[in-house]
């Protein structure tokens, strides 16, 4: 992912401030994991709160933090690398008990990790993995398998033949790269299917609407679309509805947000590879509590999603309600 010159400058200035805070020290043996500090507070830096998936992650994290007696400070980076680094710098300067990050981009997040390492503050990441620094743990869904699940479902929905489109996420993140990898590895096994277009829409609904509108103009005879998250799937769906193509063009998404579950239930979407963000938030805080207590945690915690179609969407909705996540269930499925 390219970064604008002004953003690079801002990151450089903030990184310099971070080095001053940490005394330019190197991370010690315990830097990523830390020892039991007795602290019961955490700072979580969200890449964005303009996406329902991440709002639900925050809600799950807050609910679990309340149960565990951890004071949680939530920050929103608004998809800005510079803002995320500024927020990490502030958290480190205030000696937060643990720093939890969801990187805007995997490479830029390294500065946030290394400054926490230098201050011997445990740091963990979720959903997107930083490319450097030492983490206490990383937790996220299996993005490669998510892409494979979607490809299999899309292939079945189009009868194993035809032309399909891949709408990719933010390619500066490992999640987007891995979902695309899994999708392309699996769809290549279905010899009757041709991928006629691959376009990134940065996990954004409005961008996906514009991208899909242009793709349809260039490829009027497509049979299916894979959108690497459900926000983009909703943008794709709007483009399909504008041309009365929802019955002809099968759509598979990823995440299982409320709008997507409603679309699957109505038949406007064929499927979504559901990955409960609320459950992810709960897991993040459970692991954070273990790190704060000095317990040994796995370097990586991989969660698995599940493909949801019209036949089992109500069952999945009931599962979310059981988690305490009724907010992510559309009214039609409650």
Image (cartoon, rainbow, N blue to C red):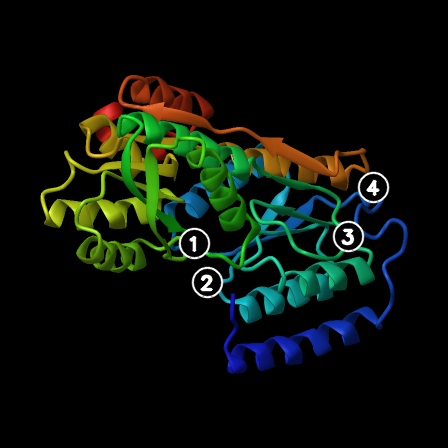
Of 51 and 264, nearer the camera is: 264
| Residue 319 locus on image (x, y percent) | 41, 20
Q: What x and y, as percent, mark residue 329?
A: 32, 30
| Distance of label 1 from label 4 (alpha carbons) | 31 Å
Distance between mark 4 and mark 3 Cα atoms? 17 Å
For residue 49, the mark is: 1
Q: Position of residue 262 (x, y in %)?
A: 24, 32
Q: In front: 288, or 231?
A: 231
The residue lying toward the viewer, choosing from 317 and 144, is: 144
User: Please, what secondary structure does the residue beneath circle 2 have?
Assistant: loop
Whether the residues at callouts 3 and 1 have beta carbons within 8 Å, the answer is no
Residue extending farthest to the front is 191
Cα–Cα gap, marks 2 and 1: 7 Å
Give the residue drawn at x 39%, y 31%: 190
On the image, which quarter does residue 226 sit in? top left
* Residue 168 visible: yes
Numbered disc 1: secondary structure: loop
Mark 2 Cα shell of 10 Å, populated few (<14), some (14-19), many (≥20): some
Kindly identify which residue carries mark 4. Answer: 36
Per the image, label 4 sits on a secondary structure element best described as loop
Residue 258: give x, y in percent of width and height: 31, 36
Q: Which residue is under mark 2?
A: 78
**Residue 154 horizontal side relative to residue 262, left or right:** right
| Mark 3, residue position | 134
Mark 2–mark 3 distance (CA, rounded to whole Å): 24 Å
Sequence-wise, the earlier of marks 4 and 3 is: 4
* Local crowd size for mark 3, using a 10 Å CA cut-off: few (<14), some (14–19), many (≥20): many
């Amino acid at each position: 992912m390219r970064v604008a010159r002004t953003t690079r400058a801002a990151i450089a200035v903030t990184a310099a401030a971070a080095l001053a805070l940490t005394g330019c020290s190197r991370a010690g043996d315990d830097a990523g994991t830390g020892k039991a500090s007795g602290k019961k507070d955490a700072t979580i830096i969200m890449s964005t709160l303009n996406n329902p998936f991440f709002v639900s992650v925050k809600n799950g994290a807050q609910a679990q933090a309340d149960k565990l007696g951890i004071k949680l400070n939530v920050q929103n980076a608004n998809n800005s690398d510079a803002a995320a680094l500024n927020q990490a710098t502030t958290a480190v300067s205030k000696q937060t008990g643990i720093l939890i990050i969801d990187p805007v981009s995997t490479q830029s997040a390294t500065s946030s990790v290394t400054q926490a390492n230098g201050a011997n503050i445990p740091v963990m990441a979720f959903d997107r993995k930083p490319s450097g620094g030492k983490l206490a743990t990383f937790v996220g869904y299996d993005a490669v398998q998510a892409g494979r699940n979607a490809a299999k479902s899309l292939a079945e929905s189009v009868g194993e033949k035809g032309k399909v489109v891949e709408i990719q996420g933010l390619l500066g993140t490992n999640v987007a790269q891995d979902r695309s990898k899994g999708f392309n590895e699996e769809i290549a096994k279905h010899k009757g299917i041709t991928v006629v277009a691959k376009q990134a829409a940065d996990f954004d609904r409005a961008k996906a609407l514009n991208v899909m509108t242009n793709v349809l103009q260039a490829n009027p005879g497509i049979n299916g679309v894979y959108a690497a998250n459900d926000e983009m799937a909703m943008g794709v769906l709007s483009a399909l509805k504008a041309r009365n193509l929802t019955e002809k063009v099968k759509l598979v998404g990823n995440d299982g947000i409320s709008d997507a579950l409603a679309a699957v239930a109505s038949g406007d979407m064929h499927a979504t590879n559901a990955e409960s963000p609320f459950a992810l938030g709960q897991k993040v805080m459970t692991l954070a509590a273990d790190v704060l207590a000095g317990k040994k945690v796995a370097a990586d915690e991989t969660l698995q999603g599940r493909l949801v179609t019209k036949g089992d969407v109500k069952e999945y909705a009931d599962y979310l309600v059981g988690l305490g996540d009724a907010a992510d269930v559309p009214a039609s499925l409650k």
